[in-house]
Image (cartoon, rainbow, N blue to C red):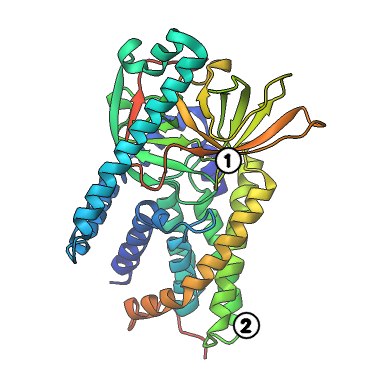
Amino acid sequence: MLALAVISQQSWAAGARGTAKSVLAPLEAQMMSIASSVEQATAIFGDIATLRGENQRLNAENQDLRRRLAELDAAAYDNKELRQALDFQRTFGHRTAAAEVVGRGPDAFSRTLQIDRGSDDGVRAGMVVVSGAGLVGRVREAGSHGAIVQTLADPQSRANVFLSGSGLQGTMIGGPAALQLQVEHRLGSVASKGEWAITSGVGGGYPRGLVVGDVVSVTHSDAATTDAAFVDWVNDPATLSLVIVVLDFSPS
Amino acid sequence: MKLVLGAMLMLAAALVQVTWASQLEIAGTFPNVVLIVVIGLTWTQGVRAGLPWGCAGGILLDLNAPGPLGLHAFALLCGAYVTGFWARNLDRESPLHPLGAVAVSTLLYSLVLIGADRVLGLPIPPFAIVVQLTMAASLYNAALMPLALIAVRRATSGLHWEPAAP
């Protein structure tokens, strides 16, 4: 098994590994559709289905409103250019591909998603993945018909962000419960609850202007070089069913 | 018959784990269905049944995980081996031993995954998160083990990969 692990990690085996990893994608898609059918069938008791549909619609609306609010906050801070950057698809004209989430990572250590688009659809490792609400993560591996996306909730994920109100910069670190944020110290500015964390583009890993989440708590320490904060991610990996892969952004 | 049943059981467990199990998240972790089934098989049918199906289930999980193939399979093999050893030497009918076996196997499984990632030079999560997730997963899997044992006993009734311990 360890020999297989070492061999499959070699660069010349990447193609075969990617192909093998997309083998289960169609079965997983079936399972996901069965799950949603079962969910619908069990909801016939009472008005659960109606309420659930309404709830989903309201949730989607809520997410959209939260995103818009974040955009407005960011625009107030960083003028018109940033506002245009936030709406990357319209203003920048990025090429995107919609993908269905067909599976999730098998263990709690790696918060990943399996999507039904792969190299045959132009998806490559390193590409940025977003949803209607904001940043989801990055493609870690791509097979021919599927790909594995490392989400921001993965403990190994990092993203550079700025805060919409104070303009402070920081680094987002993934975590199982909430995203941790290390915020830089700057004289006269303190991070506060309710601010939006938005990708800063620093480091070139993600495009500037993608909404990550809102700050839910801040721990300030005069002795430390950074403040610690927790951010409520705009996406819930357990309920994500559709994501968008940005095909023409190359991380530097 | 045994081969078909085992393959179906593992495929179903792996698909459930990568599609539905994450909906049952508690304290940052969710049930490891494949591990529970492999430990259940090992406990009821013996280590000779547990090891190959642990390997098969692990490969299926590897197909959904980032990184090299074989790590989950190796981690499950370790869990199955320890459970087989446990079942051979202790009272197999006791209701508490399988819970302990799955908790210890979960711990071992997590350590092997993290250790293998470290050996292969892959990024690993911070130690505090590893401890938190491993503990939560051990308790979660142990809580589900009695149900899993009933299900595995029913599914494999009449089949014997190896003679059960007296």
- Identify the residue shown where x is 40% and y is 52%: B60
Most foreground residue, A202 or A141: A202
Instruction: Locate residue A162: give its quadrant.
Output: top right
At which x and y percent is residue B83?
57, 72
Q: Residues within 10 Å of mark 2 (few under 14, many from 20)?
A: few
- Looking at numbered disc 1 in the image, what kind of residue is underneath it? Pro
Disc sitting over residue A179 in the figure:
none
Chain letter for mark 1: A
User: Please, which residue is most extreme toward the right here?
Assistant: A223
Q: Is residue B84 left or right of residue A32?
A: right
Residue B125 vs residue A56, the one in the foreground = A56
Numbered disc 2: secondary structure: helix
Pinpoint the chain carrying mark 2: B
In the image, what residue occupies the spot 20% across and 56% down? A49
Q: Quadrant of the N terminus of chain B?
A: bottom left
Q: Give the crowd class for mark 1: few <14, some 14-19, many >=20 residues within 10 Å.
A: many
**Residue under pointer 1:** A155
Residue B16 spot, x, y in % from top left: 35, 58
Q: Which residue is mark 2?
A: B89
Vertical placement of residue B6 versus A112, above or below:
below
